Amino acid sequence: MTEPSHSPSYRFFARWAAFSYRNAALVILVALLVASLCAVYTSRNLGVHTDTTEMLSEELPFRANDIRYMAEFPQHNDTMLLVVDAPTPEQVNSAAKQLTEALKQDTNNFLDAYYLSGDPFLERNGLLFKSIPELGYITDQLSAAQPLIARIAGDPTLYTFATILTEAIEELRSGRKLELAPILNGVSATLDARLAGVPRALSWQTLFSGEKQENTYQELILVKPNLDYSQLFSAQQPIAAIRDAAQQIGMTDNAPEKLRITGEAALAYDELNSAMLGAQEAGMLALVMVAVVLFFALRTAGAILAVLLSLVLGIILTATFAAFAVGHLNLISIAFAVLYIGLGVDYAIHFLLRHQELKGTNLTVLNALHATGGDIGRALTVCAITTAIGFYAFIPTAYQGVAELGIISGTGMLISLIVTLTIVPALQRYLPIRKRKLPTSSGRIGRRLLDLPIRLRKLVYVATLLALIVAIVALPKAKFDYNLLNLNDPQAESVQTFQELLADEKDSAWHSVVLADNQQEAKQIAARLEKLQEVDKVISIFDLVPAEQAEKLDFINEMALTLGPVVFLDSSLSADTHTIIEQHAALEELNNLLTQFIVEQPDHQTAASVRALNTALTGLLTHLKTINSNGGNNESQFLDAISQDLLGLLPDALERLQVALEATPFTQQELPESISSHWYSQNGVYQIAVYPTDNIGDNDALRNFVRAVQQAAPQATGVPVISLEAGEAVVDAFIHAFSLAFVGVILALLVLLRNFVDTLLVMTPLLLAALFTGAATVLLDIPFNFANIIALPLLLGIGIDCSIHMVHRYRNAATVSENLLHTSTTRAIYYSALTTLAGFGSLAFSPHQGTASMGLLLAVGVVLTLICVLVILPALLYPLSQRRT
Amino acid sequence: MKVNHIIKLKVHVLAVAFMLSVMPLSWADNAATDNPEQIVRDLQDSLIQAMREGDKINFQERVDILAPVISQSHDFDLIIRTVLGSNWGQLDPEQQQLIADTFRQLSIATYAGQFNEYEGEQFEILQQRSLPRDQTLIRSQLIKADSSKIDFDYVLQQGREGWHIVNILVDGVSDLALKRTEYRTVLQRDGFSALIEMLKDKILLAEHG
């Protein structure tokens, strides 16, 4: 066995390890002291930045447009969208109004709340936004309903209602032409709903307007919460305040009105929650799994402890560096903790396994450490430097979030190196690793297994070539998912609600925004945009001023005159002075008349509605008989409930009608500020909102929409534009980073290894792994996104470690015929890859989809890297090593 | 000299008496068109008068009594235009004239047909309330002999020629609403002639019903 003469670097590292061992106590003490001080410093100085928009550089052009928009219309920035659903328009309007009022009062938590559809100005002038035919139609409906309204408004009780309906049916019977179908249908539906146990109020508003009552009505409230960005969960308090306010106004779990919270701020909050939760859980899981892997690797409790201690020390020191150099973590660099757990143990594992191997050759501990240090030290340093370069390559990119991750993680690698070389030898003094005992049977099988790649190397070559071809074919299909929602937890309320809003054809929640400096420009831009087929509608302040106001006003006056003054109707729901027997009798009389009508005129126009009411009413009377036989007060209660269902919303509807009839014509200048400020800023800038035709949750639809809009209006901004542009910026950034890393790593290798062939040998399995991983994203349908795109450069850094160790071992083989795969190096690579897998794989279980896809992609990448380094590389090295001898 | 004095005095007195007798008449005229409440009162007084005549006069005579006061107090042009809504603009001037006339006849006939017997009824005006758009509301009741009451609410609009009735609500039911529903359905489904026929039928019904 020829001993290579020791290079200066060998001697340096060897002495370092020996020094640590000899002064173990001192070293450990100092380490503990430093750790404590750093921990204190970090806890005081390391913050978390949750503002995701700041993660991309401000110099990107799309950010300039966005910044201008936020300056002109700040009320739309970092908002929450409250979605209120209820079975009738009266209920949803009332709930939305009350909630908005309550939130406006809470100035601590909210800067403002807007219920735009419910603005008193729009309610009063709403009729002017209808078309002239629509106005005529509504007048007809109201005229038909007027006699009924007049009677019932004077005495809004069940008895009177039944009596009126009876009289109306009587008129119908005698041949008078009355339009009764809508109200009969409405009453039947309400009675049926109550009997079925899912009560639903009768919407008088839809009756008045002649529409069919839908199952649910929705209104949106835009809320600007008072966010404290220095807090981690800045939206938590406003969200709690909203839910409180909702409870107060009666939107409890049983209420027909439902509230859901979504919008930018809520989505960010849920995202942070799930990301943090995911990172915490992943961290726990990673620690456990890493410990398990370590056990199998080292089999000495003491050694495991040593590794874990160096890991903890490394994390503390890296966090301290983060606090010092960057000052905060962001949503991306939070992942460094989990990454560190996977990467940080690698150096310690390599060191310990080599040390164990050398101990097995009967050297003293000190000498073994000396040799280990010298042997491994150089390899580890090359690894650390190249991995650090891989991470540092992110720094000059425009994706600031990842640049910060790059700084922290890159330096973290160097810290890990120093910690390993210092602490691990020192801890050997007190926690020595035992020599490896080889169980013979599994050893033989193990050895056979390890010989396979060499023996089947022809197969390996062919398989590699095939895989390469598949990869080259599949790679161009790799996609990037611009949809920020897909990164989030799909179970979160804010995400599901937002998906629903996106799919809503009438009003996409994501729309583009274009600013214009004057009226002419605004109109021109709007005209251009409206022609695009990707654009569904374009809204600007001009749409808020309806045309033909003078003519419409005539029709509204006509409506008001025809209806007569609704003013003096005292429409408060007073207690019913009629007895149960009287009510019962009235209902029976009505039902009898309905039955008679059907018998006499089965083919009458209104027969179907009459039949429906007949059935419903019969059901009701039967139910009342059942209740009656059970005794008690229940019949009265049930009748009260029916009365409330049928008549409860009448006062509200009448009031809204009254308000709507007071419409007056107006110009743009007369719009109240609560409305116009959303469309026309204080500096005279016009806002144009552009809505997409398709659901832009789909990436192709998003791209088509944004590009089309940008062609007509290059200064367009808004979430769709930002998502697309940010996505492209990120992809660009990564292509840059990857290229930079690639070049940097090659240079570093050439400098450090001083051998072109060696550099090639290190890079080959890496490139293969990168190609295969890229192809895997296509085959496994894991598109790249804002979170997992950091996978490839990361894998580069990790893969380099494995590759370098292998090549280094190959170069410095003690014996020429030593099968590389039987060495401690292989075991070290295997186990360190396994710990890395444990660290990343645990991310795959996070509820935050972005983190999960990152974990999954990295796990796939590590497995492929392992295959390339442990199977393909030895197969390639074998003929070279044969040639050497 | 004394004779001249006396003659002058007489002339003065006559002149003043003449003016006094003339002025209230013209005041009464102006007052009638300027005071909505008075218009309603006059209408209701005429109705009571027609009722009192009862069996002594026939239908046509009742029409003759009521026609002037009804025509003057109501704005039938506005009423029929409001009733027909957008369909009014679709008629040619001849048709518009025809239906306006027929409608006026019908309204007068309806009044004449309804208010033909007196059994101690009495109108009582309750209050006046102003409404938006230059309109005012006069609330009144018809009190029957058995003390039952029917609400009669009149909406009047101020035009160039003073106040006119544009809508009547009986027990809250708007006459315009009733007519709109009925007339527009017939007009849109069966056409203009059918509508005119229907109105004429109603006139006959009012006479003989």
Image: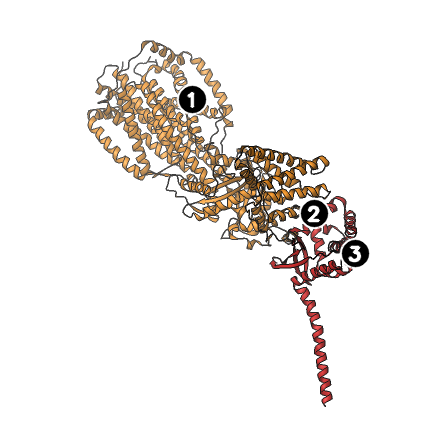
Residue on which disc 1 sits: A864
**Chain painted in red in the figure:** B
Q: Quadrant of residue A30?
A: top left
Give me the residue at 39% from left, 13% from top: A454
Q: Quadrant of residue A489?
A: top left
Spatial separation of the CA atoms under disc 3 and disc 1: 107 Å
Task: Name the chain letter of the residue that bears numbered label 1.
Answer: A
Is residue A114 depicted above or below B43 in this figure?
A: above
Judged by depth in the image, the label closer to the viewer, 3 or 2, is 3
Residue on which disc 2 sits: B181
Give me the residue at 41% from left, 18% from top: A872
Question: In the image, residue A861 lies at what x, y percent?
Answer: 42, 24
Residue on which disc 3 sits: B59
Judged by depth in the image, the label closer to the viewer, 2 or 1, is 2
Q: Quadrant of residue A640?
A: top right
Q: Does residue A233 appear anywhere in the picture?
A: yes
